[in-house]
Amino acid sequence: MALLYKSDPDRGRRWQALFAEHAPDIEFRQWPDIGDPEDIRYLLAWQPPEDIATLLPNLEVLFATSAGIDQFDPGVLPDGLPVVRMLDPAIEQGMIEYATFATLWRHRHMSDYVRQQHDRHWQAHMLVPAGRRRIGVLGLGQLGGAIACHLKGYGFQISGWARTPRNLPGITTHAGVETLDAFLSECDILICVLPLTRDTRGVLDHALFERLPQGASLINMGRGDHLVEADLARALDSGQLSGAVLDVLAEEPPAPDHPFWHDPRILMTPHVAAMTQPDTAFPVLLENLRRHQRGDAMIGQVDRQRGY
Ligand code: NAP
């Protein structure tokens, strides 16, 4: 029985060592050296091969190396193939760190100070107490929920929005599209940690920005296609938004002439908010492999109909 790994080759070497040490009964193979495809029962991938259905006839589970699975084309996956996303604790930690950094960056006017230093300009901006700063988190799942709870510790007013009602201590939660307006009207800093689905694609658009308080900030750490980039530019130009932090872009990397490269109101990072780490992800994956072998439910199995 073999597991095929198809992702970053450097981290593949570490995955291989972990399998050899802790699960020698599962043969680890690294793409493109797949050996006899009939042996492969499990695929661990960022992006599966396009001919997955014919190439791997005995595949039993597709494990994503990522928390999101929007990069998978449902059209090429065999019907009924279980898809499991990665719930590596290092991803949660990375997302918390990034959200904290980006929130404080906006909260404490850091982009203004970077610009001012460049211009040799010495000017203080009024400090807003954390208790008066309203932070809104779009998506209150594994990652959004952890971010909301962590930021609460700084004394911010935190609210969050999900599809279904969530109960998080000290956090005002909203559920469903009918509550979106009320939620948005109280977000000075909006953090998007939604999964990318047919319902959430393009959610960060002109209509949404118009419902935020004037001068609000946007932090997108979900997926690039959540954002309508032209609408962000327009909202920044009009002053409806004052700045943005984007870890994800529709095209990664953005084209050399993309206007965001040179826009001082936008801080861009190359999709680095969180990264799967083999050492912390391996126990999670192995637990799921053993669960599957015993016929138990796996943790993080995606609802393929719902898209997350
Ligand atoms: P999750 O546990 O599945 O949570 C998703 C949350 O979004 C849930 O609260 C869900 O509502 C809500 N949601 C989904 N569709 C919605 C809709 N149509 N309307 C309102 N709320 C909706 O996912 P997660 O583990 O937190 O991960 C979220 C995303 O973060 C991933 O899919 C990925 O895109 C992104 N991510 C980015 C990075 C990076 O490096 N930038 C790293 C890791 C992950 P319910 O609670 O009601 O189901």
Image (cartoon, rainbow, N blue to C red):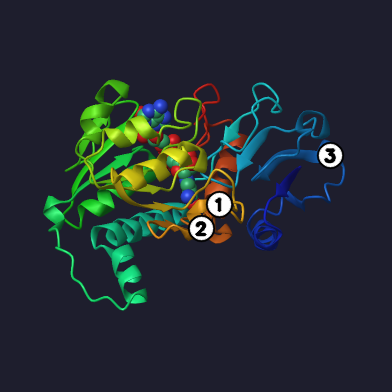
Is residue 266 placed above or below 86 in the rendered structure?
below
Classify residue 1 by image quadrant: top right
Residue with the mark numbered 2: 261
Evaluate whether residue 193 shows in this view: no
The amino acid marked with disc number 2 is Trp
Q: Position of residue 281 (x, y in %)?
A: 54, 53
Residue at point 28%, 46% (across, down): 239
Q: Quadrant of ligand 1?
A: top left
The amino acid marked with disc number 3 is Pro
What secondary structure is found at the residue carrying circle 3? helix
Residue with the mark numbered 1: 258
Residue closest to the eye, 58 or 183: 183
What secondary structure is found at the residue carrying circle 1? loop
The amino acid marked with disc number 1 is His
Work out whether mark 3 precedes mark 2 in sequence or the reverse, and give the earlier one.
3
Horizontal side of 117 relative to 84 (left or right) equals left
Find residue 115 and name its label: none
CA gap, disc 1 and disc 3: 42 Å
